[in-house]
Image (spheres, coloured by chain):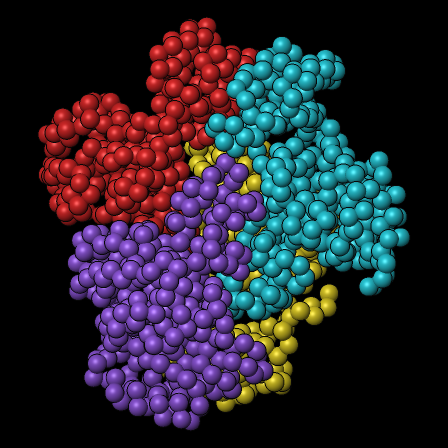
Chain colours: A purple, B cyan, C red, D yellow
């Protein structure tokens, strides 16, 4: 698991907060002083005469590890203290630790594991947790620990959630729900302490909740879709990271919608996980900026 | 308005009803006896062992006008009486008369007029009716009668609707709402007596009702869409004919969403009108079969 | 390998040849006499007044196995002898045997194996053959025999091809080149005696031959694509079954084009294999009809 | 021609040249000193450790007209002289003057005129020139001068080109070939002295030259496309600005490909013109950066 594809000596810097004149110059001046060469920069202002400011910069620093402490201190002084903005700096050669929760379906899960193995995703996968055992053998074939934590049908999930939190604690930077068919409680989200990304099998806000393909079939829509979003306490209402659709017709049965949709789900989820892990996604209230 | 592009001596036959073995053979035998050569045939059964049956056939008949009466009688005897199915036969060289209702926006309206003039749509446009006068000059440039029927803001629209019905009576085979920003009453739909197609500026069932682009912006969706559907008494709930989407990002203001969406609207509506006028669309409860 | 998803008692019938009035009726009458209920029917005529005729029918026959011999004989008498058309009847509950040839890349190969296991493709995979060993372990994890047949770099491939033909003989109904980076000789294609489908990593006819992503980058195209086609003696010139594209920008390096393209490749190939195995594809000279 | 939609007090700054550390900081510092607030910034480096640098900045300056001279001088001193980079500054409230050359087809032409009238394109259209008169009436309905300059079939076009150059001289910032079916000479391109954008009716580099839809039909492709590119002396070989495709099938005749393709052409061309006029396109050899 060498992650040879991760860019050496590259860091991403995300800055956001209240817009004012001179932020780009101030940030770029700090970077220049530490020998950073800006490789790409995306900036967005909500309103030309005020409002929120968002910026993501990717930079190359000849000896990043050595430069990191001084760069961090300097950014804190200028961007945090002087300008009063939020900021975060990530060494892009360090993969994020992404734990995956799944149920019986394998399509989203296997796609993530395969992309990770292939070097397409800047992540390591410390574990896969499922309330079923269907995917156990596949997961272990990838050399990844698998934990089976069943959830009582219709019953109290407090204990199961506590066990999951215990396994994840300090071992993960992101939790991905790869068609995990359980609703997580608000207290779980709080205790787990890292972002949680879910893939919902509809084009939100259409068909929130259970059975979206069945309802899509019944409504007679001509496109079906998927949505990757950050999980919040409100079911399927969190900030959307990515969506996509595929054309369907009257010819397709519900089973075929499920199959066609699965292809969209795994792609949308993979893109959302990639973008999150490259620190391209900034939450802006209940929406996202994706640079 | 020569409609030189309409296929001479071509007819479409739509058959639907309860499925049973032998329908295709029976229908094809009737056609063969009248010298019809089947040019394309699409057939769909909801369930392999029963359920609803749908079929659309396009045929070439050497002298269609002469053959029409006998063919019609024969179809009624076999398809209507013997098989107990619904059917309709259309001479595809006769354009449908399509009246257009619009408000201030010109994009859907002009696209339809332009496609009609260009010979892309097998339609004639007997009139355009609007509750505003913004588009009058454009419409008349196309040589099409324009009628201004204002609707009292927030008031009773009964009189306006009655006037529209009077203009449309016997002059139209289809009514198209090309971003007509008025809700039509159930009694209007009944009295007008022909199908009504609307373009809704969202990917239904997401953002039913007013202000879909604004709500799309607020929800932070990554795709915006449009839906063409038959109008029923339930707002934005009628059978969907066509939908499409376009990718948007955080960069786009509400005004830009409106502009980007307009491009999707006019294309989706044009496809729906084309398909309806080629008799490709069969209503199946609140859904459609589009062959 | 239960293929529980394959439709029981369903058959597809493909008919093609010179168009004339009455074919649909004649074929449908034969089917009706054997108790077949037509589930879907697609028909295409190249020219309303003559030219080539193509038809695919899917039917449900209550006891297909028992009905097969009489149905076959009847079709031969009417469709083959009387009408002089080519035809083929396939029991859709019997999976096609699909042998896969691969090299080092795993994306197209694994996607096919995974879809097969999942029940998405109506196929069995009797073997995977590669000129490298990189994918051996993955293939065997799926319980599928793997054969390593190296090809001498720049040397004579006659012997390798002969070995492959020997392995495939009588064991396969279709050969799929899942990014098999070797050009197969005309005599191989002849001896193997079954169709061969290839995935080319460009939007043909753009970038025929080697290095399409590199050439796409150099030309500065804004979309990259993939093409699945039947293999003929002329490199990348065979009948196209399916194509698709994905949007790229100046930001993407060659490595990223390769990664983005791989996603398109595996989807395009999977669709082409599915459609071939459902007998939806009819060759029409160097083009295809896909019903 | 009020162009009320053009952003007041907004300018775009494009900078490109050899990459080195500190460019972003230097440019942003200049802008900050003149009270410019950066509204959006896109930056791209070809290579993290050197190579070419590209940047586009959109800024809001409270009183842009007053600030322009000092800002220009300062940029020339720092960006031009000190850093040795190429740069250009555009007041985005001034529309570009775009002359359109057309032949008989109206779809691309009318789409541009309609978008201009609607306020979607930051352009004025000083004139339309055609070698036919088919579109004259439409053009004049939009209140735009029309000039008919016929070109001798198969003959010498030198005189016609000279006339066109004379009409365009000092009156245009961009020439758009909206399906102008004449090849322009190298000397014309030189004399006209402004960029020329063409729409080619294929997905380049497939089907370079004449008759792309016919050749697409013959090759049996499953998608047809369009390409907008800057015109150079090499036919259809200039830098690509935008491309798109639409799915087609065996059912579609050549006439239908032409019709379906026309929809793609007008959209691709409109996007390319918009992006050029917002100064989003930077030529990089025979490729483009589109921010």
**C88 left or right of D115 in image:** left
For the point 45% across and 23% down, which residue is it? Answer: C59
Q: Nearer the viewer, residue B256 or D69?
A: B256
For the point 56% across and 83% down, which residue is it? Answer: A50
Q: Nearer the viewer, residue A187 or C15?
A: A187
Residue C286's quadrant in the figure?
top left
Residue B113 visible to the viewer: no
Give the total number of marks visible in the rendering. 0
**Figure check: B127 above or below D56:** above
Q: Position of residue C287 (x, y in %)?
A: 42, 29
| Residue closest to the far front | A155
Q: Nearer the viewer, residue B284 or A203?
A: B284
**Figure check: D255 above or below D182:** above
**A25 left or right of B107 in image:** left
**D44 left or right of C19 in image:** left
Image quarter (top left, top right, bottom left or bottom right) of the N terminus of chain C: top left
For the point 42% across and 41% down, which residue is it? Answer: A255
Q: Position of residue B62 (x, y in %)?
A: 66, 14
**Figure check: C164 above or below D69:** above
Q: Position of residue B48 (x, y in %)?
A: 47, 28
For the point 58% across and 36% down, which residue is it? Answer: B289
Q: Nearer the viewer, residue C113 or A16?
A: C113
Q: Position of residue A122 (x, y in %)?
A: 27, 66
Residue C133 visible to the viewer: yes
**C139 left or right of C252 in image:** left
């Amino acid at each position: 698991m060498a992650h040879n594809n991760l860019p050496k000596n590259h860091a991403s810097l995300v800055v956001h907060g209240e817009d004012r004149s001179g932020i780009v110059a101030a940030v770029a001046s700090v970077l220049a002083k530490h020998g950073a060469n800006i490789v790409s920069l995306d900036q967005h202002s909500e309103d030309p005469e005020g409002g929120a400011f968002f910026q993501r910069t990717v930079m190359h620093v000849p000896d990043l590890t050595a430069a990191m402490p001084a760069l961090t201190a300097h950014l804190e002084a200028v961007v945090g203290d002087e300008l009063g903005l939020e900021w975060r700096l990530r060494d892009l050669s360090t993969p994020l630790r992404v734990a995956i929760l799944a149920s019986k379906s394998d399509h989203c899960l296997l796609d993530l594991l395969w992309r990770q193995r292939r070097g397409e995703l800047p992540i390591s996968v410390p574990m896969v947790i499922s309330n079923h055992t269907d995917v156990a053998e596949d997961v272990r074939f990838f050399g990844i620990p698998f934990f089976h934590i069943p959830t009582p049908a219709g019953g109290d999930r407090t204990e199961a959630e506590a066990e999951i939190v215990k396994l994840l604690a300090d071992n993960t930077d992101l939790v991905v729900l790869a068609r995990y068919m359980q609703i997580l409680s608000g207290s779980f989200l709080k205790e787990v302490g890292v972002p949680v990304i879910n893939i919902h099998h509809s084009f939100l806000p259409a068909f929130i909740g259970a059975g979206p393909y069945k309802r899509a079939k019944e409504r007679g829509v001509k496109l079906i879709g998927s949505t990757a979003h950050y999980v919040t306490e409100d079911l399927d209402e969190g900030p959307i990271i990515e969506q996509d659709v595929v054309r369907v017709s009257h010819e397709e049965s519900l089973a075929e919608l499920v199959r066609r949709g699965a292809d969209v789900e795994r792609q949308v989820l993979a893109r959302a996980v990639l973008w999150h892990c490259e620190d391209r996604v900034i939450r802006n209230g209940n929406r996202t900026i994706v640079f």
